[in-house]
Amino acid sequence: MKKTILAMTVASLVAAAGTATAADLPRSSAPYYSPAPAVYNWGGGYAGLNVGYEWGRITNSSISPSGLEGGLQAGYNWQSGQFVFGGETDIQVTGADDTFAPYKFANPWFGTLRGRAGYAMNNILFYGTFGLAYGQIKGTFAGLDESKTHAGWAGGLGMEVGFTPNWSAKIEYLYMDLSNRAYSITGTTNGFETNMVRFGINYHF
């Protein structure tokens, strides 16, 4: 059974501070004031794309599907001071599969509907997310295919950076658990527990 350990180190601190110096001004000149720094607005709707990699295991088996995944996301944020909260949905297609003769299992697609809550340091947002997950598991045995749609949950952590008023980029870790269902080809119940790391870009309306 393949075991994967994720070591995820995200180091990011982008700080921009402008200092204005008033030197050699005439004694009678009006006081010089530096403009107040702009505050990034996370509120409102957004939509975007993401791409990443997922790896996991089919429960009650020795099969560990992994592969690339990518898809679309959309959501809405509310902001109160430095606190940001909202909801997000996404739909993904994946190439995650694995063969342990004579069985093959794959996760062709999945989607999530999650809440998000985080803390903004101006244009940098750190957040947690949790909610509903659903997706397809496809099993193959001796030329026979069996596919089922599973429901479960997903949760994780992420960081999003706004680099213009309308565009942001994010990195996100997500764990997803699609609960067990009975499969005739295995004679038992099987589900899918998976990890994923993905990168995305959003346009804010």
Image (spheres, grey):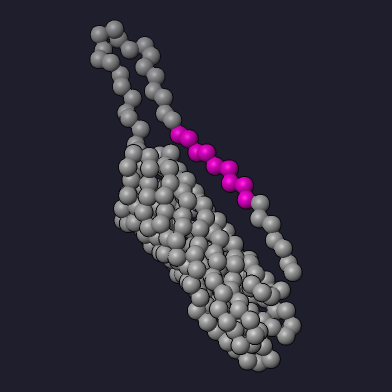
Residue found at the far top of this picture: 27
Residue 71 visible to the viewer: no
The magenta region covers 8-16
Q: Does the magenta stretch include residue 97?
A: no
Q: Residue at the location (60% across, 79% down)?
A: 189
Q: Residue at the location (48% across, 35% down)?
A: 15
Residue found at the far bottom of this picture: 143
Up-down relation of residue 130 to residue 193 (above or below): above
Q: Is the magenta stretch mostly helix, strand or loop?
A: loop
Q: Nearer the viewer, residue 8 or 12?
A: 8
Q: Residue at the location (31% across, 53% down)?
A: 44
Q: Residue at the location (32% across, 28% down)?
A: 35
Q: Where is residue 178 in the image (x, y as percent from the top left)?
A: 54, 70
Dividing the image into 4 quarters, which one contains the C terminus? bottom left
Q: Where is residue 166 in the image (x, y as percent from the top left)?
A: 36, 51
Q: Position of residue 58 (x, y in %)?
A: 64, 73
Residue 149 visible to the viewer: yes
Q: Which of 98 and 34 is in front in this view?
A: 98
Is 73 left, or right, of 60 in this rendering? left
Is 73 left, or right, of 59 in this rendering? left
